[in-house]
Image (cartoon, grey):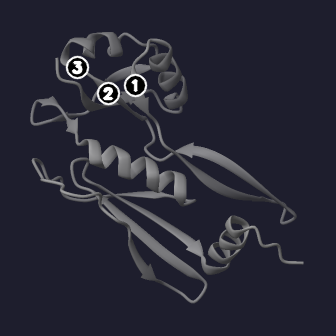
């Protein structure tokens, strides 16, 4: 049977539990996380991780495995499109995972859903310059109907380049 990516709706804040349960059953899944920077009392910075898509886990399954996936605890239903479970393109899943791993503070916006789009090569992020201190990066996921947006400070990029090249600044 042919395996495809499906979006599984979960109970609020149970995405990681559902992803762990699917992994335990041997089902390939994806629950991309984004880094959020929190400032506590103005002195300490704390990094927290949260799912890019709240209440969604993506599962790579065949039609026969759909009932198995729905029997997991905290899994509610599949996302539907025109009366059938929505199928997500492999390229969108890969782009989403790479984008979430590379950029912090990823935000999700709605856009038009484009079905049966032919993706010949991976979609590259679009860079825009915002204010002097930050850069806005966007990527479109046509089969999901979402745009992922991240903004980062230019100083953040400079620090990361120095760390990757092994240079330290004192």
Q: Is residue 21 above or below residue 54?
A: above
Secondary element at tag 3: loop
Secondary element at tag 2: strand
**Label 3 neighbourhood size at 10 Å, few (<14), some (14-19), many (20+)?**
few
User: Relative to residue 119, is residue 39 drawn left or right?
Assistant: right
CB-based contact (under 8 Å), mark 1 and mark 2: yes
* Residue that carries the numbered disc 3 in the rendered image: 62
Label 1, label 2: how many angstroms apart (C-alpha)?
A: 5 Å
Which residue appears at 57% of the width and 80% of the height? 134
User: Relative to residue 163, is residue 54 drawn left or right?
Assistant: left
Q: Is residue 69 above or below residue 100?
A: above
Secondary element at tag 1: strand
Measured as percent of width and height from the top left, residue 143 is found at 21, 48
Q: Is residue 80 above or below residue 145?
A: above
Which residue appears at 19% of the width and 18% of the height? 63
Measured as percent of width and height from the top left, residue 111 is found at 25, 59
Q: Is residue 169 above or below residue 146?
A: below
Label 2, label 3: how many angstroms apart (C-alpha)?
A: 7 Å
Label 1, label 3: how many angstroms apart (C-alpha)?
A: 11 Å
Measured as percent of width and height from the top left, residue 150 is found at 49, 65
* Residue that carries the numbered disc 2 in the rendered image: 60
**Label 2 neighbourhood size at 10 Å, few (<14), some (14-19), many (20+)?**
some
* Residue that carries the numbered disc 1 in the rendered image: 28
């Amino acid at each position: 049977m042919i395996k495809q990516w499906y979006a599984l709706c979960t109970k609020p804040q149970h995405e990681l539990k559902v992803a762990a349960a699917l992994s335990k059953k041997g089902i390939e899944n994806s629950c991309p996380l984004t880094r959020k920077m929190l400032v506590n009392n103005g002195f300490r910075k704390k990094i927290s991780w949260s799912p890019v898509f709240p209440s969604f886990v993506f599962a790579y399954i065949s039609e026969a495995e759909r009932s198995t996936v729905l029997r997991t605890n905290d899994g509610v239903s599949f996302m539907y499109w025109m009366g059938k479970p929505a199928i997500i393109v492999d390229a969108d899943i890969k782009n989403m995972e790479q984008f979430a791993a590379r950029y912090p503070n990823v935000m999700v916006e709605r856009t038009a859903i484009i079905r049966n789009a032919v993706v010949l090569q991976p979609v590259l992020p679009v860079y825009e310059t915002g204010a002097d201190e930050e850069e806005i990066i966007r990527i479109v996921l046509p089969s999901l109907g979402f745009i992922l947006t991240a903004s980062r400070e230019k100083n953040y990029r400079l620090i990361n380049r120095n760390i990757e090249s092994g240079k330290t600044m004192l």
